[in-house]
Amino acid sequence: MTSNPQFDHVIPATASPTVEFVSQIHWNPSTEINPIAHRGLDRAWVREYSRALDEGGFDYTLVPYFSSSPEPFVLGSFVGAVTERIKPVIALRPNHTFPLVAAQKLATLDQLTEGRALVHLISGGFDAEQRRQGDFLTKDERYARTSEYIDLLRLAWTTKTPVSHDGQFYRFEDFGPGFATYSGEPIPISIGGESDAAFNIGSAKADWYAFNSGASLAQTRADFDRVAALAAAAGRPTPRFWVTFRPIIARTDAQAWDKAYDYAARAGKSAGAFKAAIAGKSATLPAQSEGARRQLAYAEAAERYDRAVWTGTTRATGGGGASTALVGSPETVAAAILDYVDAGASVVSIRGYDTLQDAKDYGQYILPLVRQELAQRAATGRRGSLQSEHLGYYSDEFNSAADRASEKVGALA
Ligand SMILES: Cc1cc2nc3c(=O)[nH]c(=O)nc-3n(C[C@H](O)[C@H](O)[C@H](O)COP(=O)(O)O)c2cc1C
C-alpha cells in the first residue's frame, strides 16, 4: 500500500501540540445498545465508571444537564470525591441559577476538588425543553443572557471590592468579594452550539468552544476558522476547540465494522422506542437546535467521511445528541483523532455505546496511541507514521471491510 501524500512527516501549521480527553458521565449502566429499566442513579456504578475514566487517563468528564437528569453540581461533586485527577465539567443552564450563586457553587466545587472544576454553559437548543423548567425566552434571548452570565461569573470570581449591576437580565447591589476559586483565577468556561448566536457569543467570550457531534474535517476546519475570526474581532484569544465522537473500536478494522453495524441496529431499535415514548411532547425537538439539524444533514449527505467518520449511528438513531462514530481498529481511530488535532482541536471527547467497557478500552488502547504520537512530534518536530499507515477510507481494504459488514446486515434483514 502506498502512503497517502497528505500524511507525510510535516506537522500541519494548524495542529495543536497537545490534546486532552473528555468523557461524559452516565448515571447507570443503561445504554442505547442495551437499554435496561433502572430506577435512576446507580451509586456504585457511577463510582466504578468515574474511576475507570480516572485510571484510564481521561482528563475531564462532562456532567450533562437535562430536565430529567440528575442535578450536575451534586453529581459532579460526587465524581470529584471518588476520583483523584479527572475534572468534572458541569453543564449549566443559566435559567436555573442566578449567576453569582452559580459562581459560588463552582468555586466551592473547585476548592473541594483542588482546582478541578470547569463549566459548560448551555443556552438551550430546544424551546420545549427550556419551558419544562420555566424558561420562556427565545433562543436568541437565551444566548444574550448567557453573554451577560459569563461576564458576571468572571466578575464574581475576581472582584476584590463590592460591585452593583443593572443589566439586561440581572440586577444586584453591593456584591463582593465573593468566594474564590482554588487558584484564585476564573474557572474555564465552555460554550457549544452551531447557531449564529452560539458562534457569535461563544467565540467572543468562551475559553473553550465545543462541538457536539463530529463533522467532516472540511466543515470542522471552516467552523474553527469562523470561531477564531470572531474571537479576534472581539479582541479575545482563540478559544480551545473541543470535538466530540463516539468511537466503535475492535482489534481489527473488519471486526470494528461488524460491531458498528450491530450497534447501529440495536441503537436504532431503542431510539425508536424512545421517540415513540416522547412523541407529541417533543415533536419539534430536532428542528430547533442548529447543531442537531446540521448533524442530520451530514448523515443524509454521506455515510462515510474522511478517514473513519461514520454516520450510520446518526442515521439509525435520528441524531440529536452526540452520535457520529469513528470506526476501526485502535490505530485507525487514533489516526482519525489526530486528523482533528491537526485541524486544531485540543480537547477531544470520546464516549462509546457500551459506556463502561468503552471507557476502559479507550483508556487502554486509544489515549496512549494519540499521546505517544504527540510526544514523538514534540521530541522530533516530525509527524510519526500512525496516520500514513492506518488510512481508513483512504484505502480500498478499509472500504471493502465496511462494505462486507454492511452486506451482512442486508443479508440478515
Ligand atoms: C459538548 C457539548 C455538550 C452539550 N451538553 C448539553 C447538555 O448536557 N444539555 C443540554 O441541554 N445541551 C447540551 N449541549 C447543547 C448546547 O450547549 C446548546 O445549548 C445547543 O447546542 C444550542 O443549540 P444551537 O446548536 O442551535 O446553537 C451541549 C453541546 C455541546 C457542544
Image (tube, grey):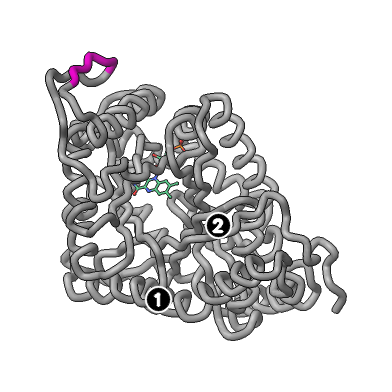
Label 2 CB-ligand 1 distance < 8 A: no
Residue 49 in view here: yes
Q: Quadrant of the C terminus?
A: bottom right
Q: Which amino acid, mark 1?
A: Gly
- 350 or 383: which is nearer to us? 383
Residue 32 pos. (x, y %): 39, 66
Q: Number of callouts in the render?
A: 2
Is 142 on the left or on the right of 309, as rendered? left
Residue name at image x 40 percent, y 40 percent: 285
Check mark 1 vs ligand 1: CB closer than 8 Å? yes or no. Answer: no
Quadrant of ligand 1 in image: top left
- How far is mark 2 from mark 1, CA to CA? 30 Å
Predominant secondary structure in magenta? strand
- Determine whether, in the image, residue 8 is placed left or right of residue 222: right
The residue at the point 31 percent across, 42 percent down is: 185
The quadrant in which residue 325 appears is bottom right
Q: Give the residue number, with chain letter if any, for mark 2.
A: 315
Residue 71 visible in image:
no
The reply to whether the magenta stretch includes residue 88 is: no
> Which numbered marker is on residue 384?
none
Q: Which residues are magenta?
A: 163-168
Residue most extreme to the left: 174
Above or below for 11 versus 95: below
Q: Is residue 156 above or below residue 358?
A: above
The mark nearer the N terminus, 2 or 1, is 1
- Residue 14 spot, x, y in % from top left: 67, 49
